Image: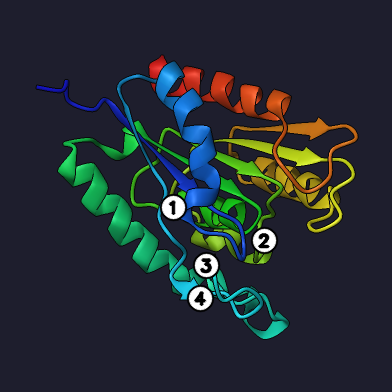
């Protein structure tokens, strides 16, 4: 029989991609965290710009602020089911998201009933920052990783997120990847693995 899982790592894909997109990271995560279950859900809606892909919420201005709120209940329910299935608590959960998935990881991780072990946002942003102080229910450790040359979600979004998170006493680390556009590079991913080693293994 397989040993019981000791943690859950949930990968949240970017806009117009799907669950398979981030599963490329799974072998490295499984190697570093052999007791972890690595899972990647699909976003709840088909992406208008790419019918083969999925989205967590619509990116048009009217829904940008409330979009994460609409997607969050489904994500929270999935998290609850997965944790229960594996007999794990929220303190054994790490959320990793890229781009729109990073936005969802931050938005959801700060609004859980209990703090999760850690949240990693690659090339993401903190949406509706003005609501954070009133709505924050948990203070997980957070790692923000962003390419300085990101042409999709500007690098400044990370700096704003870092400042806002510090203002509400969240333990946040921000890492700028010089010369990187909208993506995840090897060094940034290694930083995420080191971060998870501290949050999941200590």
Residue highlighted by disc 1? 137
- Residue drawn at 23 percent across, 28 percent down: 5
* In this picture, residue 69 sits left or right of residue 41: right
Q: How is the image coloured?
A: rainbow
Task: Give residue 129's position: percent from left, percent from top.
Answer: 67, 61
User: Mark 3 near mark 2, Cβ–Cβ under 8 Å?
Assistant: no
**196 up-or-down from 14: above or below:** above
- Residue closer to the observer: 56 or 28: 28
Task: Find numbered disc 2 in the image and state the secondary structure of the residue it sits on.
Answer: helix
Label 3 vs label 2, nearer the camera = 3
Q: Earlier in the sequence, mark 1 or mark 2?
A: 2
Quarter the N terminus occupies: top left
Q: Give the Cα distance between marks 1 and 2.
A: 14 Å
Label 4 vs label 2, nearer the camera = 4
Q: Earlier in the sequence, mark 4 or mark 1?
A: 4
Label 4 vs label 1, nearer the camera = 4
- Residue closer to the observer: 13 or 78: 13
Residue highlighted by disc 3? 56
């Amino acid at each position: 029989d397989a040993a019981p899982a000791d943690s859950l790592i949930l990968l949240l894909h970017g806009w117009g991609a799907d669950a398979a997109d981030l599963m490329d990271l799974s072998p490295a995560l499984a190697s570093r965290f052999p007791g972890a279950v690595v899972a990647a859900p699909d976003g709840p809606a088909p992406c208008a710009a790419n019918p083969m892909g999925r989205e967590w919420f619509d990116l048009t201005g009217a829904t940008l602020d409330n979009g994460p709120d609409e997607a969050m209940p489904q994500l929270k329910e999935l998290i609850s089911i997965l944790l229960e299935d594996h007999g794990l608590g929220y303190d054994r959960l790490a959320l990793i998201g890229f781009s729109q998935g990073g936005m969802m990881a931050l938005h959801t991780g700060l609004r859980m009933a209990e703090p999760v072990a850690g949240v990693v946002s690659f090339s993401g942003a903190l949406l509706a920052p003005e609501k954070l102080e009133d709505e924050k229910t948990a203070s997980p450790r957070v790692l923000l990783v962003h390419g300085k040359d990101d042409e999709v979600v500007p690098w400044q979004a990370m700096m704003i997120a870092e400042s806002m998170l510090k203002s509400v006493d969240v333990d946040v680390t921000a890492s700028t990847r010089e010369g990187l556009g909208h993506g995840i590079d090897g060094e940034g991913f290694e930083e995420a693995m080191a971060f998870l080693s501290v949050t999941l293994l200590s």
